[in-house]
Image (cartoon, rainbow, N blue to C red):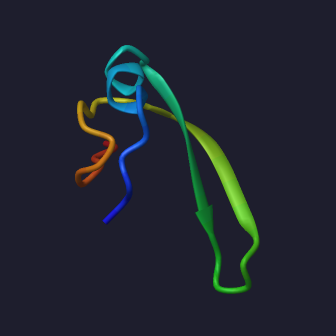
Amino acid sequence: MMNEIPGLEESFKNHNVIYLITFDKDGESHSRPMTNYNKNPYGLLWFP
């Protein structure tokens, strides 16, 4: 579970693009812009 960050939820709802950052098994990060269809940054995120 993620700790809540003040202002994150409201900001998340108001933006159509977010940057998703993932890490591979070696710890290398990969970031990419994703269209945001989600309303809650603390729940399960869905990207079609």
- The N terminus lies in which quarter of the figure? bottom left
Q: Give me the residue at 41% from left, 21% from top.
A: 11
Query: Quarter of the image holding residue 38?
Result: top left
Q: Give me the residue at 64% from left, 85% from top.
A: 25
Residue 17, horizontal then vertical, whole percent: 49, 24
Q: Residue furthest front?
A: 6
Tell which of 24 and 41 is nearer to you: 41
Q: Residue furthest bottom?
A: 25
Query: Quarter of the image holding residue 33?
Result: top right
| 26 displayed left or right of 42 | right
Q: Residue furthest top?
A: 14
| 19 displayed left or right of 39 | right
Relative to 21, residue 9 above or below: above
Q: Give me the residue at 42% from left, 19% from top.
A: 16
Q: Give me the residue at 41% from left, 32% from top.
A: 6
Relative to 17, residue 47 above or below: below
Tell which of 12 and 28 is nearer to you: 12
Residue 47, horizontal then vertical, whole percent: 34, 44
Query: Quarter of the image holding residue 12?
Result: top left
